[in-house]
């Protein structure tokens, strides 16, 4: 994918921009699937396209490296991080541990207005055909039913893991290819939470994440077999 073409569609930032602003622009391009794994991220080109100095670009890339979105290779510089199937499987396993802990507490005290909002989110996700909007609603649904307010560190951990894998789902419209399975699983999960069924919610969630892991890995294998250059993250 053309880095310049992607960045020209992103908003320009201030000449004296902080690295957080530059990181935000690059993070959005990566997590939305516009920049795929192994794509080079030359500092000169990024600085020119965003009309900023090299310093915030360098610091932004280091920040994104700490988030697992960028990697550095000797003599090649920075590039978008690519995940292997084994890494994707591990991320989903870690998510299952963290998100099961989150939903266990949520089942005990989720407010009725949150349940109503979750129903509205699912209804909208079932209507939209926009992959980016579907992905945004998916994140909103999970964060809502996990009741992460007041638990910023848990929220940060879960959000970071979501960012690492959601960019693959957004590539090639993979989310919409599997929307029926996801939506059915979301409905079952919400039903268990609404009933305060801690065990049922945990089982629904773990099944949902295990299924998502299998589907994404299968899609990666399928796309690689069809055309190596079309692999999400290649």
Image (cartoon, rainbow, N blue to C red):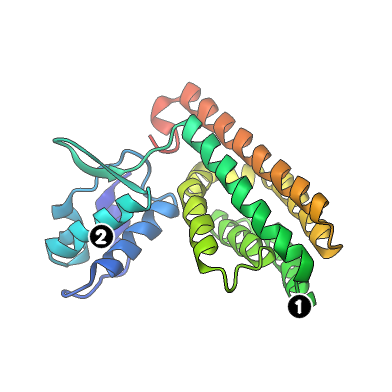
Relative horizontal placement of residue 159, taking residue 25 as reference (left or right): right
Q: Quadrant of the N terminus?
A: top left
Q: Is residue 66 left or right of residue 138?
A: left
Q: How many circles with numbers are drawn on the protein?
A: 2
Find residue 60 and name its label: 2
How far, Cα to Cα, is label 1 from label 2? 38 Å
Q: Please identify the residue farthest to the bottom as the structure is shown.
A: 113
Q: Residue at x 53, y 45 (%)?
A: 169
**Could you say where residue 25 lies in the image, as x and y percent from the top left?**
33, 63
Q: Identify the residue shown where x is 62% and y is 35%.
A: 215
Near mark 1 (Cα within 10 A), the count class, few <14, some 14-19 or many ≥20, is few
Mark 2, Cα crowd under 10 Å, few <14 / some 14-19 / many 20+, is many
Residue 170 at x, y percent in the picture: 51, 48
Q: Position of residue 113 (x, y in %)?
A: 76, 78
Residue at horizontal 24 percent and vertical 48 percent from the top? 41
Q: Earlier in the sequence, mark 1 or mark 2?
A: 2
146 relative to 228, above or below: below
Query: Residue furthest toward the right?
Result: 195
Image quadrant occupied by the C terminus: top left
Residue 49 location, quadrant: bottom left
Q: In the image, what residue occupies the spot 31% across and 69% down? A: 11
The secondary element bearing badge 1 is classed as helix
What element does badge 2 sit on? helix
Question: Residue 192: percent from the left, percent from the top?
Answer: 82, 57
Residue nearer the viewer, 82 or 174: 82
**Residue 195 tag number:** none
Front-lying residue, 213 or 131: 213
The residue furthest top is 225
Q: Which residue is mark 1?
A: 113
Instruction: Find residue 89 and report its image quarter.
Output: top right
Q: Nearer the viewer, residue 78 or 100?
A: 100
């Amino acid at each position: 994918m053309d880095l310049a073409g992607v960045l020209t569609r992103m908003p320009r930032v201030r000449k004296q921009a902080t690295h957080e602003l530059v990181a935000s622009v690059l993070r959005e391009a990566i997590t939305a699937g516009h920049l795929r794994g192994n794509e080079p991220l030359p500092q000169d080109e990024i600085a020119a396209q965003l009309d900023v100095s090299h310093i915030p670009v360098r610091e932004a890339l280091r920040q994104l490296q700490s988030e697992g979105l960028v990697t550095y290779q000797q003599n090649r510089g920075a590039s978008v991080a690519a995940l292997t199937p084994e890494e994707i499987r591990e991320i989903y396993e870690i998510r299952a541990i963290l998100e099961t802990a989150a939903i266990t507490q949520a089942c005990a005290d989720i407010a009725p207005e949150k349940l109503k909002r979750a129903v509205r989110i699912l209804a909208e996700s079932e209507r939209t055909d926009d992959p980016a909007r579907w992905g945004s609603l998916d994140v909103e649904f999970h964060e809502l039913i996990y009741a992460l307010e007041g638990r910023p560190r848990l929220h940060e951990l879960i959000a970071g893991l979501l960012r690492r894998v959601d960019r693959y789902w957004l590539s090639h419209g993979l989310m919409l290819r599997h929307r029926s399975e996801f939506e059915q699983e979301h409905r079952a999960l919400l039903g268990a939470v609404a009933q305060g069924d801690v065990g049922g919610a945990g089982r629904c969630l773990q099944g949902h994440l295990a299924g998502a892991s299998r589907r994404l890995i299968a899609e990666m294998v399928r796309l690689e077999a069809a055309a190596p250059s079309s692999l999400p993250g290649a």
